[in-house]
Amino acid sequence: MQDKWWDISWNVVVGCKRGCTYCWARKMFNRFHPKENFEDIHYYPERLTIPLTIKRPKRIFVGDMCDLFADWTPKCYVEDILRIIKKCPQHTFMFLTKSPDGYNNFEYPKNVWLGATITGIKDIDIADKLARIQTHNLKFLSIEPLLDRINTPHFLYTDFDWIIIGGLTPKAVHKKEWVKEYLWFNSKRPVFLKDNLHYPKVLKEYPKPKGA
């Protein structure tokens, strides 16, 4: 079964300065670029036109090896990406960041989904910042890897359109009760549970695009 919630990833920018110990992107980068530094922000303008070559509608994860909206990423890189997105209304473009305040610096077409990523209750401020953003775009929260209990009553009063939950690999540290509690409290919101949760119930739900 397909465990990715996107169809393809699009990495015009690669690199991140956060230093998360669980970061798979850093490990991947170091494997193939051992002489380069992942904390340097690498820009690949030759990749900008990739979505233009894809005619069938796709869910495109934009920048899964960087944080486009962190303060170290030049705004002109994001502007270049958004110019291409506006030319591809057939696709859905999904952003994820730990700096959702950065979303306020740009305007987005309706086929852009704005997401934030957290690991549990200790990152609740990130979720709050995303919730406070006023936008016509779909908003979603990725809780991955799940390292701490989810504050389920808190999420009941936010306007997230979609939730993704995934475990730590290769060895998960979460409790199944954390996932069960969230699903019990919030059965009306679409949820995508990744296989690395090892949860007994299979859920691969997607939200309806706004205006659909």
Image (cartoon, rainbow, N blue to C red):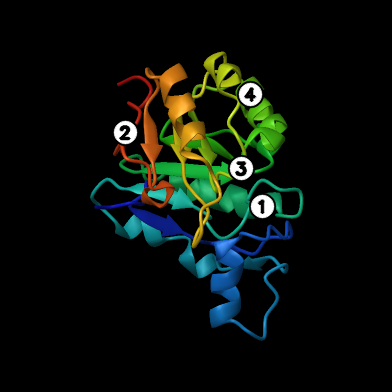
Which residue is labeled 1 in the image? Answer: 76
Mark 4 and mark 1 lie on one chain; the one further toward the N terminus is 1
Mark 3 and mark 4 lie on one chain; the one further toward the N terminus is 3
User: Can you tell which quarter of the image residue 211 is in?
Assistant: top left
User: Which type of secondary structure does the marked residue at label 3 adopt?
Assistant: loop
Which residue is labeled 3 in the image? Answer: 119
Mark 1 and mark 3 lie on one chain; the one further toward the N terminus is 1
Which numbered dot is residue 163?
Answer: none
Foreground: disc 4 or disc 1: 4
Which residue is labeled 2 in the image? Answer: 205
Task: Locate residue 123 relative to residue 27 in the image: left or right.
Answer: right
User: Which type of secondary structure does the marked residue at label 4 adopt?
Assistant: loop
Confirm or deny contact between disc 4 and disc 1 (CB under 8 A): no
The quarter of the image holding the C terminus is top left
The residue at 61%/57% (across/down) is 66
Q: Amino acid at mark 2?
A: Glu
- Mark-to-mark CA distance, 4 and 1: 22 Å
